[in-house]
Image: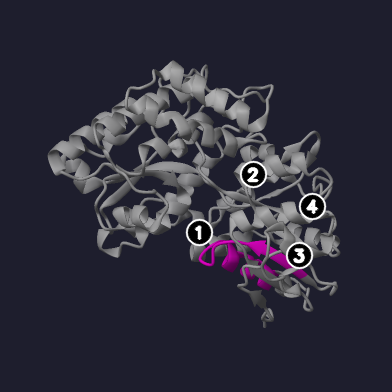
Amino acid sequence: MKKKLGLLFSSTLSLILLAACSGGGEEASSEDFASADDNTLTVWAWDTNFNIPIMEKAGEYYVQDGNEEFKINIVEMSNEDTKQKLVSGFTSGVSEGLPDIVLMDDYDVQNYITNYEGKFTELSEDIDFSQFAEYKVDNATKDDGVYALPFDSGSAGLYYRTDYLEEAGYSQEDMQDLTWSEFVQIGKDVKEKTGKWFVAFIPNRGTHYIQMAMQSAGLWYFDENGDIYLKDNPAVREMAEILKEIEENELAKPVDYFAPEGIGAVTSGEVAAVNSAIWFSATIRSAEDQAGKWAYTNVPQLETVETATPYTNLGGASWVILEESPNKDLAIDFMKTEFAGNDEFYQDILVENGAVGTYLPSQTGEAYQFEDPFFNDAPIYKDFSEWMAEIPGVDYGNNTQAAVDALRSVLQGYFDGSMTLDEMLEKAEETYTMQVGQ
């Protein structure tokens, strides 16, 4: 009989250590930090519907695999709080105020492993990284070391309402192999003939569209030297024009795409299409009355970039182990056993949590052959996982958020005609340079 894990769970959003860092506040509970108990691991992660229950399940499997005394203490911590507390701990030098394992957004990994050298455990001697999606490993690599264990995929596609598209005159065959300009034209027809919004996001904050397009061509905000790369970046230029056209034609319901109002626009039937990752399929599926009305295909493809593909990523995270963890060896063995070696675990979290992992051997399992009745019996997990293997790897660099902020600060000026495309991108580069001092 399988033994049940005695789970220690804390939902405290703790404040780290030094109240002086924020000018006041309560000290964090010691239960939020790495334990002196050599059978216990403390993990910081966010999302009680996804990452946290998955880590709980990994702990249960580890107990079943013969580690009967093992306990896992999972602390719910937002991504922003996690980053703040890591920086506070690293700069104060008080390692006992930190956990053993941290969930880290992929866009932040390079920043942290580069700027906080020696704070994260190098894993290549313990983990076979050839078994993970290449683009995720590339992002976790610095020099010759790999400092994060890849977790979930942000493999992305275009979801669309077949009934709305049919009303606008488009079949599912018409939705295959689209370019971004064709995507916009379809949106115009959908709005004219159905009265529906085509998509839901705020165009002048639509950098997630730019990022999906860039990664699909193996490009990013920075060139091979790490310098800001906006004005001469063909993907940025093409997508700025696409976003402007979406704005001018009022194709997008102007709401934060990942806030409740953005999600609600999709689940209430207000929009016809969504470009997002596999993890968004759970949100779409939550609108049970829309079963059979959704289909999916690859994201649209760039026309002006020779390296363009229809494969890209949005979001996703990886696990890092802190070098000064008092239980580092246990943490490595736990992650190696479950996240880098347990096919059954990955099949379980796919079925129960909708998590497409980036551990490649797991993707031949039966769960990946599941034909989803919500999507008219399409093998959604198989398709998105096959696309994942084709996603071009890019170096997210140390300052992705600064580049995002700089670009967002000037997009509206381009949309309203007060700046040309060149002027807008020049201004974005100047703003970035002022922010990061390059």
Residue 165 appears at what percent x and percent y? 21, 41
Residue located beneath label 1 in the image: 367
Q: Earlier in the sequence, mark 4 or mark 2?
A: 4
Residue 159 located left or right of residue 136: left
The x and y percentages for residue 355 are 53, 57
| Residue at point 59%, 66% (across, down) | 52
Name the front one of labels 2 and 3.
Answer: 3
Marked residue nearer the N-terminal end (3 or 1)? 3
Disc 3 marks which residue? Answer: 17
Label 1, label 2: how far apart the Cα atoms are: 31 Å
Residue carrying label 2: 108
Amino acid tagged 2: Asp
Give the amino acid at mark 3: Leu
Q: CA distance from mark 3 to mark 1?
A: 44 Å
Residue type at mark 1 is Ala
The dot on residue 90 is 4
Marks 4,1: beta carbons within 8 A: no
**Vertical side of 390 occupied by 308: above or below:** above
Q: CA distance from mark 4 to mark 1?
A: 41 Å
- Cα gap from disc 2 to disc 3, whole angstroms: 23 Å
- How many angstroms separate mark 4 from mark 2 (CA)? 16 Å
Q: Can residue 302 be seen in the rendering of this structure?
A: no
Please state the extent of the stretch shown in magenta in the rendering.
Answer: 41-61
